[in-house]
C-alpha cells in the first residue's frame, strides 16, 4: 500500500521545497526592508512639512499615510507569495469577489469605519495631539487611522475607538479656552470687599501667568449656597492651559482671603429648639 512512497523523487521534492522556502524568506526580508525604508521616507517628508502646517495636522497625515502604505505593501507581498505557489491571482480575485458578496453584510462595519475615517481626515475634525471627546471617551488623540482612532485618557488608558462610533466630535483644542473658578465667602463677609480683593488677585495673576490671554475678571455673585455666597472669576487662556490657570487662581485667592480675614465657609447647620 505504501509503494507510492518509493516512487517519490525525494531529491527533487526537497529541492523544490528548499527553493520555495528560500524565495519566501527572501520576500519576507524584502518586505521588512521596503517597509523600513518607506516608513523612514514618509516620516522625513512630514517632518519637513511641519514648517508648512501645524504639528498635529502633520502627524495626523503621517499616520494615515503610514497606514495606507502598510496595507498596500501587504497586498503586494501577498501577491508575490501567491505567485510563488503558482496560484492564479485573477482567479483568486474573482473568488474573493464572490466571497466578498457572501460576507458583505458582515463587513458593513469595516466599510463604515473606513468611510467615516476618510471624512474625519478630509474635514480635519481632529488631529494628533488634540484633546477631544468622541464616542463618550475623553482623551488626547494619539493616532487617526482609516479604521480606528486611538485616544489616550487622562488616567493613561489607551482607548481604541472604531471610526463608525464617532458620530459627534467635541474638539477642546481649537482656539483659546476658558478658565472658570467659583469661590464661596461667608454670608457675614462684605461682598464688595471680597470682590475688590479678588480683582486685585486677578490683576496680579494676569501679569505673572503668560498662559492667560484675556482677564481674569471677577464676574460677580454667581449663586447663593447653603452656607456661602459664590463669586465667579473667568479668564481666557492658551489652549490646554486652562486647568493650570484655574489651580493658580484658586491658590492665590485662598491666600488673599486668609490675609484679609475673609472666611471660605465649610457646610454647617443651625439647630433651633422650640419649647412647647
Image (spheres, grey):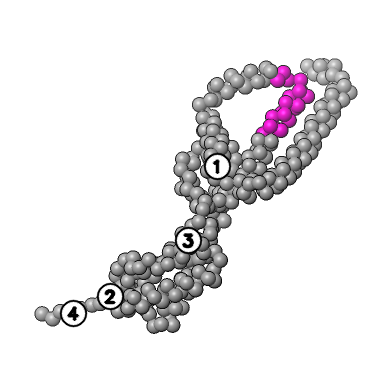
**Mark 2 or mark 3: which is in front?**
3
Quadrant of res 101: top right
Q: Which residue is mark 1?
A: 124
Quadrant of res 264: bottom left
Q: Position of residue 267 (x, y in %)?
A: 33, 73
Q: Which residue is mark 2?
A: 269
Q: Nearer the viewer, residue 101 or 54?
A: 54
Mark 1, secondary structure of its residue: loop
Q: Are marks 4 and 2 in contact (CB under 8 Å)?
A: no
**Mark 1 or mark 3: which is in front?**
3
In the rendered structure, find residue 236 and report the number of the disc placed on it: 3
* Real-space CA distance between mark 1 and mark 2, rounded to the nearest whole angstrom: 53 Å
Q: Nearer the viewer, residue 99 or 159?
A: 159
First to last magenta residue range: 71-89
* Real-space CA distance between mark 2 and mark 3, rounded to the nearest whole angstrom: 37 Å
Mark 3, secondary structure of its residue: strand
* Real-space CA distance between mark 4 and mark 2, rounded to the nearest whole angstrom: 13 Å
Characterize the local packing of mark 1: few (<14), some (14-19) or many (20 or more) Cα atoms within 10 angstroms.
few
Q: Are marks 3 and 4 in contact (CB under 8 Å)?
A: no
Q: Are marks 1 and 3 in contact (CB under 8 Å)?
A: no
**Mark 1 or mark 4: which is in front?**
1
In the rendered structure, find residue 245 and report the number of the disc placed on it: none
* Real-space CA distance between mark 1 and mark 4, rounded to the nearest whole angstrom: 65 Å
Mark 2, secondary structure of its residue: loop
In the rendered structure, find residue 273 and report the number of the disc placed on it: 4
Judged left or right of residue 29, residue 249 is left
Amino acid at each position: 500500500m505504501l509503494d507510492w512512497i518509493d516512487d517519490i523523487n525525494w531529491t527533487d521534492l526537497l529541492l523544490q521545497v528548499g527553493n520555495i522556502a528560500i524565495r519566501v524568506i527572501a520576500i519576507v526580508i524584502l518586505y521588512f526592508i521596503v517597509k523600513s525604508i518607506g516608513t523612514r521616507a514618509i516620516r522625513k517628508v512630514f517632518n519637513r512639512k511641519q514648517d508648512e502646517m501645524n504639528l498635529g495636522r502633520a502627524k495626523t497625515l503621517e499616520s494615515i499615510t503610514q497606514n495606507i502604505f502598510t496595507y498596500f505593501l501587504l497586498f503586494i507581498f501577498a501577491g508575490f507569495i501567491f505567485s510563488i505557489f503558482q496560484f492564479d491571482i485573477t482567479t483568486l480575485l474573482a473568488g474573493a469577489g464572490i466571497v466578498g458578496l457572501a460576507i458583505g453584510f458582515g463587513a458593513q462595519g469595516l466599510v463604515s469605519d473606513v468611510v467615516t475615517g476618510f471624512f474625519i481626515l478630509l474635514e480635519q475634525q481632529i488631529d494628533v495631539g488634540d484633546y477631544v471627546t468622541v464616542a463618550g471617551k475623553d482623551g488626547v488623540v494619539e493616532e487617526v487611522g482609516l479604521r480606528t482612532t486611538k485616544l489616550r485618557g487622562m488616567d493613561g488608558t489607551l482607548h481604541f475607538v472604531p471610526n463608525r462610533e464617532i458620530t459627534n466630535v467635541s474638539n477642546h483644542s481649537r482656539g483659546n479656552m476658558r478658565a472658570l473658578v467659583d469661590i464661596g465667602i461667608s454670608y457675614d463677609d462684605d461682598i464688595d470687599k471680597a470682590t475688590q480683593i479678588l480683582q486685585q488677585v486677578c490683576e496680579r495673576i494676569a501679569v505673572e501667568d503668560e498662559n492667560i490671554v484675556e482677564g481674569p475678571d471677577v464676574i460677580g455673585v454667581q449663586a447663593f449656597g447653603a452656607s456661602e455666597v459664590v463669586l465667579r472669576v473667568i479668564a481666557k487662556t492658551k489652549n490646554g492651559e486652562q486647568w493650570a490657570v484655574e489651580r493658580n487662581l484658586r491658590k492665590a485667592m485662598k491666600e488673599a482671603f486668609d490675609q484679609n480675614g475673609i472666611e471660605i465657609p465649610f457646610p454647617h447647620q443651625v439647630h433651633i429648639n422650640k419649647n412647647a
